[in-house]
Image: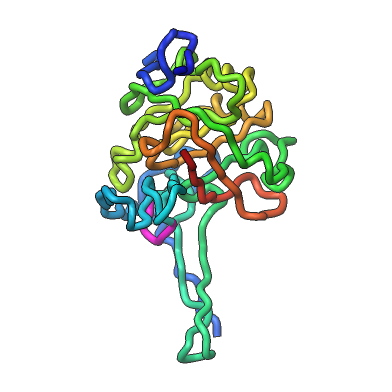
Amino acid sequence: MPLETDRGSDVRGRGTDRGSVSPPEQPSDGRNGSRPGIRPRPTFRPRRTVERDPVGTSGRPGEPSGGPVIDLSHPIEPGMPTFPGDPIVETWPHATIDATGFNLTAIGLSSHTGTHVDAPSHVEPDGKSISEFPLERFRYDAVVVDCDAGGGDPIGSGAVPKAPSADLLLFQTEWDRHWGDEQYWTYPYLSVECARECARRGFDVGIDAPSVDPEGADLRAHHELLRADRLIIENLTGLEALSERPTVHAFPLPLASVDGSPVRVVGEN
């Protein structure tokens, strides 16, 4: 039976309220960042958008990789989109076969690179770090919420479904189709009322857009969720490949006392 929302629509029906080698120096130009106290974002280097494999054999995001597991994460690679003001992704050789007999690559990124999870300490001074949550927290019985929301549109509280057995809401806006384009940064987001309702009902949330708050805002949706110890997964992709009620795994790296982590999110229908 289709899940109902407060507006009486199906969850899948539309429903919103509208030696070592030193690392290279990061460029200092680029548009201004919007996170408080963060330096400007380096020059944007768009990644070429890749068409999805219709038979699901390529291992690209949003498609099964030779089995029933669906990849919901963007690849981490130099030149990928990063949130305005955040560090860019870099890799460089620390050791090479020619010099040392083996390859070893150094990696530079942030705790919120690509598809990632926000811990409460991201915005709450006394909030938990990502390592304070047990592993079982990151295995979910999820609900996909199909949102009819465009760029810059808030998703209202009416989109939150009545799903007492679920613990993760995945807001599918299909904004991931703009990944690699500047348009990606004018995205749908959660209204404060929507975030508050998710927190009240005990849902962690995920979204296929850069953030649950609009760029340049005061992170009110983040605060509503994270102060209630509800986790936030951002920059998802391929949610349209999921069923209405998938099982989702979103395990973070074992980073001690850190405010978030890149995650390899996978779903099973």
In this rendering, the answer to whether 118 lies above or below 142 is below
Residue 165 picture quarter: top right
Report how many numbered discs are placed on residues in the image.
Answer: 0
Query: Percent x, y for residue 106?
Result: 52, 71
Residue 177 picture quarter: top left
Residue 147 picture quarter: top left
Q: Provide the major secondary structure of the magenta segment.
A: loop
Q: Nearer the viewer, residue 22 or 59?
A: 59
Q: Residue at x 36, y 35 (%)?
A: 240
Q: Residue 77: say if magenta.
A: yes
Asked if residue 143 can be seen in this view, the reply is yes
Q: Residue at x 29, y 50 (%)?
A: 55
Range shown magenta? 76-80
Q: Residue at x 32, y 28 (%)?
A: 151
Q: Residue at x 48, y 54 (%)?
A: 87
In this rendering, the answer to whether 75 lies above or below 145 is below
Q: Residue 238: say if magenta.
A: no
Asked if residue 213 can be seen in this view, the reply is no
- 195 sits left or right of 76 in the view: right
Q: Nearer the viewer, residue 16 or 118?
A: 16
- 233 sits left or right of 56 in the view: right
Query: Percent x, y for residue 94?
Result: 52, 78
